[in-house]
Structure formats: C-alpha cells, structure tokens
Image: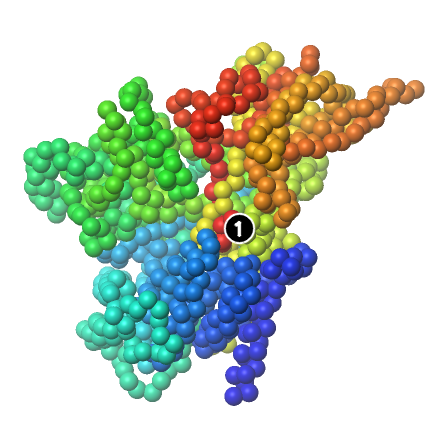
Amino acid sequence: MQHTTCTEDRIYHALERCLHGLSRDAVSSRWAAGLCLNCWSLQELVSRDAGNYLILVEKILGKTKEVQDRCDYDLVTPLALLFYSAVLYAPHFPPGSDLLLKAASIYHSFLTWPVPYCDTFRELLTFISNELKAPGITFQRLVRTEQGLPVKNYQSSTVTVLLLNRSEVQSEFLSIAEKLSSSEPPQHSTLLLLLQHLYQANFGSRCDLHRLHHLLKSKPLEELSELYASAAGAQEAAAASSDPALARERPPPCPPCPPLARERLQAVLRDIAGAASFSAGTGEAQPHKLQPIAIPPARCYTYSWDQDNFDILNDVLSKECSIAEPLASENEEEDEEEEEEEEEDVETDGGSPEQDSLLSPLCAISSDSVYSVQSEEGSKPSRVSLFTSSKESISELTVVSRKSLKSFVSSLKDCMDSGYAEDSDESSLDTAGRTEPRAERPPPRHRQSLTNKLYKLFKGKSQQLVQRRELRDCPGPCSLPLRRAESLCPTLRVVVFGSDRISGKVARAYSDLRLKESSCPSLTRYFRLQFFYVPVKRSCVAPSTPQMHHHPSPSPGEPSSRAQDPSLAGMENSTNDISHYIGLLDPWYERNVLGLMNLPMDVLCQCAKPEAEPQEDSQEQLPILADMILYYCRFATRPVLLQLYQTELTFIGGEKRTEVFIHSLELGHSAATRAIKASGPGSKRLGIDGDREAIPLTLQIAYSKTAASGRSHWNDVEKVCTSINLSKACRKHEELASKTECLNLTMTEVVKRQNSKSKKSFNQISVSQIKVDKVQIIGVQSSFAVCLDQDEQKILQSVTRCEISVCYKPRDSDPLAPRGSPVPPQDPSEFHSLLCLPLATFSGALP
C-alpha cells in the first residue's frame, strides 16, 4: 500500500512538472530548457509498470476538473493530449474500471466551450467510445498505418519523410534521423506485436503474453497475416457497431455492465485463438502480469534537402509505386473476366451521375485504400503494403473500367485543384469558372513514368471501388468533379529541420508545389500532405554552394556559385523567429518541439533506461530526440497557417521576377553584407563594414499602413538609407490579436554623412520601425541587393525596384490594380484568398 501511494505521488508530481509554466500567468518560466523533457520523463516513468497508466489517467481527470472549474484555457489542450496518450499506451482497462466513462462524463461538459476546444473534446469522446467497444483499437490503427500493414477492408498508410540540410545540423542529429529511417521492424515482428497487444487489451491479465508470444512466433508470415486480419476485422466491426450501453447522451457515473460490442469481440477472439491452437492465451487460469507494449518506430525516409522545391518527394512516390506495382499486378489475371463484364455494364450505362464520378480523383477511392511500401537498403527485406479496397467504409460502390481508369490517370490534370487539406473549402472552387480548354502539353518524363506505374497499380483490386460525393462540377468541357477528399488518400508526413533560412525554403517549395500540382497533379493526387517543422540552431557550417543572382546575365537571376569559407557563416546569421511565433500560438509546441533546440546534443542522444525485465525480441530504445520527433508527428494534428509574402523584383535591364518569402527580406547593405560573408575567401579581401561605413542609397519608398478602422493609408517618401529590412510581425503575446500578416519595416536612415581625414566617410544613422501591409521601393539612379529569408542562396543583385505584399492563391484573372500603382482595389470582394503555409501543431492557433 505504501509503495502504491509513493508511485501515485511520483506520477502526480511528474504531471505537475509537465504542465508547469504553460499558463500565461506563468509565462516567465517557459525559458527553462529542461521543461521540454518533462513530457518525455512522464512517459518514461509511467511505462515502467502497466498499472501506472491507470494512475496517470485518474490524475489527468482530476486535473482536468480543476482546469474546468477555473476556466484555465491554456491547460485544456495539454491535458487532452496527455489523456489521449495515456489511454493509447495503456495495456488494458479492467472491465470494472469506470475511468473511461468518467472521462466521457467530464469531457462532455466541454462541448459548450468555444472552438477549437469543443472540437478537441468531441474527438476525444469518439476516441473513448471506440476504446470502450473495441479496446486497443487506436493503438492498432496507428501501428498499422505507420507500418503500412495489409489488412483487408481496413487499411490506411502513412509515410514519414525527414528532410535535413547536412550543412545546418550537427552530425549527431543526422545519425539520429538515419537511425529512425532504418529501425522499422520486420513485418512478422510487427504482426506478432499487434496480436499480443490486441489480446492483452481485451483479456488483460487472463492473457499469458509470454506463452502467446512463443505460440505465434513459430507461425509463418502468411498464417500470421491471416490470423491478424481476422482479429483486426472483428475489432473494427466492434468499433463500428452501435452499442446501446454507450448510446446515452451523458454516460452514467457508475460503471454499467461491459458493452455488448466488447463481449462479442472477446467471443470472436476466443474462436480465432481456438482455431489457431493458442486458446491457452485467453484462459481463466491464474492472472498474469500485464506488460506495456511500445509503439514501433514509424517507417521513414531520410533525405538531404536544401532546395526551393519538393521535387525530391517524387522519389518517395516512385519508390512506393514501384514496390507496390508487382503486388497489384498479381491480381490482374484473376480479375480479368470480372473487369470485362463490369466494363460492359459501365459502357452501356449512359451518362448517369455515377458515371461522371468515375473519373473523379481519389475522392472516388475508398478511404482505407492505400499503396504503401518501403524499399530497404542492403540485405534487409522490403516492407510491403498491399493495395486493397474497403467494401464497408463507403456508401455506394461503382465499378471503374480499365478505359475510364486510364483516362483518370492521363487527362485529369487540367480539371483538379491541388487539394491541400487546409484549403479544401476554397481551392476546390478556384477553377470553377474556367470554361476554355487549355492547350495540352506533355507532362515531364519523370511524371510520365510515375503515371505509368500508378496506372498499373490502380489496375488491381482497388480500381473496382469509387465513392460518390457531392462535388461542384465545372461548366462546359471541364465537367468533372474538381475536389478529392483529403481523408481518402495515404498520408505523407513531410518533416523539415532547420532555422528561418530553411523555413523560407519550405515556403518557396510549398508555393512551387501548388503551382505544379494545379497544372499536373502528381503528389497530391495520391498523398495527403502534412508539413511538420522542427527548429534547429544553425550549425557553424554555411551552405556548401551559396548562389547569388546577378544582372546582367544570360537569364536574369540565374545562380552563380562561389567558393566559401565555412568559418564566416556563424550561428548568428540565421534566427528561429518562425518557430518562436508558432510557439506563441501553441504553447505545447513551444514546450515539446521548440524546447528541444535549447538542449545539449548529448542529452538528446540519450536513451531511456533499459527495462528491468526485457521482453524477448524487444525493440531497441530510441534516443530522446527520435522519441520527441515521433511524438510530434503522431499527436500534432491541427495546422497553423503562416502567411506567405511575395516580392516582384525589377532588374536593371527591365526584366521582372517574382519570389516568395515567409520571414524576412533584407535590402541594401544588410543583403550585401550577407553576400560578402557567403563569398568565402573574397570576404577577407572586401572586408565587412557596418552601416556607419556603408555607401548610402537614395530610395523612393511607398508603403501602406492599415489603421484601426481597417482602411489603408499610403505614404510616399524619399529616404537616404543604408538598409531596409522587412520581417514578419507578431513576436509577442500582446501582438497576437493584431493583423499577423503585417510586416515590420525597419529603415536604417542616413541622417548626415561625415567626411573624415581618412579615406572612408562615416554615416550618422537613425533606425525607425513601422508596421506595413504593402511596400514599394525604387532605387533613385541606383540598384541594390535583396536577400530572402536570410538565405545566401537567395541573394539577388542589381535590383532597381522591389514591391512586397502578402501572397495570394493564383487565379485566372488578377483582381488587383496594376502592379505599378500602389493604390489597392476599392471592392474588398475582389481580393483573392490568402496563400498560407500549413504547419502541424498540437492545438492549432488558440484564441
């Protein structure tokens, strides 16, 4: 009894430490670097014994009641995430336990809270309902999804891609990322783990996990797959059932009898165990000790990335399809006769609405359909995911003929939007008014090869199912549905590591991806993209090939490389303002992701303590950094939208170029200084002067400043400056309520230029800062340099005119006034929707 009390106290204090400093009245304590380890430490403490999870859930519910009573909004989302994680990892909830019903009763009262809190608890209530009817189903779905396991009728897939720039992160960081991408277990081990977890979650201490492990380990992969498919199918059926015991609007305070769905599930699992000769694992003999089962690492790809595009993701798509293609083709012969019969039926069906939906993008394919495989290097076997179709998850079934499918792959590129999750309500209508057919042009060669692979892939069983949806059709020739349901595609997690320089590359790559996918969909046709951002302090090594854009040149803005001295580009040359801004919006991101940046690398490389009683074939312990990256990817499901900005640059020869940035634009001496630092040995010869020694520029500056009434007021001045810098506004909590798309305009103005007896002259400078919406800068008989997002590869020289504004989603016609005029349009309805970069967070932007 004393030991139990001591354990409860330790868990309670660990929970308190985990929540410490998250309330806004305690914001001053957030700077402590060690706070980011509290969540990981709590999980490590609780995982030492299976009973600790029930204690943790009880403490979380008690804390939630306190938060509810005092309306502490800052702790609501962290507590919800901690509850979700605790229940997810809990090996078993005894039938007599009322913790889940108690949680449902507490969380039901949060449905009256404002958005996004009510949405969070609505999802939690669904999660609790599923766990009551089918214990452990959320764990099962997560592992199946991350490993891409083939389970008939209940399949989805998630592929995680880690993008790092080797010149910006430390070598230990790279080794951890590479370890993550090579630590996935074989399929046989994963199926064994899932079966053990499923039976323990449902039978608890009646399940002899050790005996079950030995009985299942000797079975071949094919038999193990069949066993698991049957068990998982029964579990999914239980979760989908309507259980009268849980149908009440508000769960009772006292525990009722076990839900009927759970009883039926246990009966089916006993039958499956008996048929497979391992019924001893579910007997009524003496109780056995429960064992926590860890989630295996997600399957990952790791790439070195330092580009302004996401073309490297096509390699992931190609690998996934090239491995899944032979699996899909195995079913072609057996389905040949059936397809021919179905094709005849479709062709004679006429122009029905169902036929129109045949050529819709992935909205026509089951939400559980997936093609997902991993090609492993060396002698390691490939991890394979079959591409199967769900017959129960869709309301209507329609057969797709081979002819229609080929048309789907080859000709839909002109009729669909990019289909990103964050603009699913808007982007689907962007092309609704397009009635004129566009000129056909052949897709790039690599896209043709992908198309061929995907066509063969879709010729398998998955091509038989489509789902009708209410979609808005284009008038005229573009009469095909434009939207695809984002929930129907495999998910591609894109995790990018770096400083503000890298966040700028992510912004430009995202903008480039939207343009490419809107004209010729490839990635977004088959993947639902999610973007994650992990801040990293920039290493002392600068980019290996800085590119500076000069004029005149054969083509304006073409890059030219120079050698460089790594010692010249230090950590102070790039900030992490974007991640700090996200942390202001989401304190749990600040605590568990941003906080990692302040920890020493030797701490991040440490692993949890080894288990006191390690299980046979137990997983290798991952470093803290790897655990936290996976935690971020698994639990950060709500994106924040970061405004993108665009600048139209005019060069000396009159050529124009449009660029995108997200954090900062440096103009004049500050950009030239960054170029000198990146030039390598030349910087020693040229020297680096401050603003007092810089050559002044005469600039004509027009800027729009939005008043409190919402009206824009334009100012037009002529200044003598050394530098003009624009950066994303909103770095403090009190600024969050203002217009976050504003930019801080900082002018370093030369008040007086003094001539000295030496060769150099000195400037008497004055620095001023204002918030602006739009800016137009013109060099008066002079040109200047421009640098985007502190990126040495985005320095553009010989610029004479620079116009900066927020970035809008492209449309056929530009509703803005002529770009040469600083006057905005008078009718607000003419504005496009803003183009934002969606980055995953735990809570989204809190009010």
Q: Is residue 292 above or below residue 690?
A: below
What residue do we see at 53% from left, 68% from top? 69
What residue do we see at 76% from left, 31% from top? 767
Residue furthest to the right: 757
* Secondary structure category for the residue under label 1: loop
What residue do we see at 28% from left, 54% from top? 155
| Location of residue 109 by image quarter | bottom left
What residue do we see at 31% from left, 35% from top? 450
Q: Is residue 381 above or below residue 774?
A: below
Is 218 placed left or right of 82 in the picture?
A: left
| Location of residue 87 by image quarter | bottom left
Residue furthest to the front: 709
Q: Is residue 21 above or below residue 684?
A: below
Q: Residues within 10 Å of mark 1 (few under 14, many from 20)?
A: few
Q: Foreground: 197 or 119?
A: 119
Q: Which residue is mark 1?
A: 847
Q: Amino acid at mark 1?
A: Pro
Q: Foreground: 380 or 328?
A: 328
| Location of residue 363 by image quarter | top left
Please provide percent x and percent y for residue 320: 34, 44
Q: Foreground: 182 or 364?
A: 364
Can you see residue 163?
A: no
Is 627 placed left or right of 521 in the picture?
A: right
Q: Is residue 149 above or below residue 248?
A: above
Please provide percent x and percent y for residue 340: 9, 39
Can you see residue 613?
A: yes
Report how many numbered discs are placed on residues in the image.
1
Please provide percent x and percent y for residue 436: 29, 20
Please provide percent x and percent y for residue 212: 31, 75
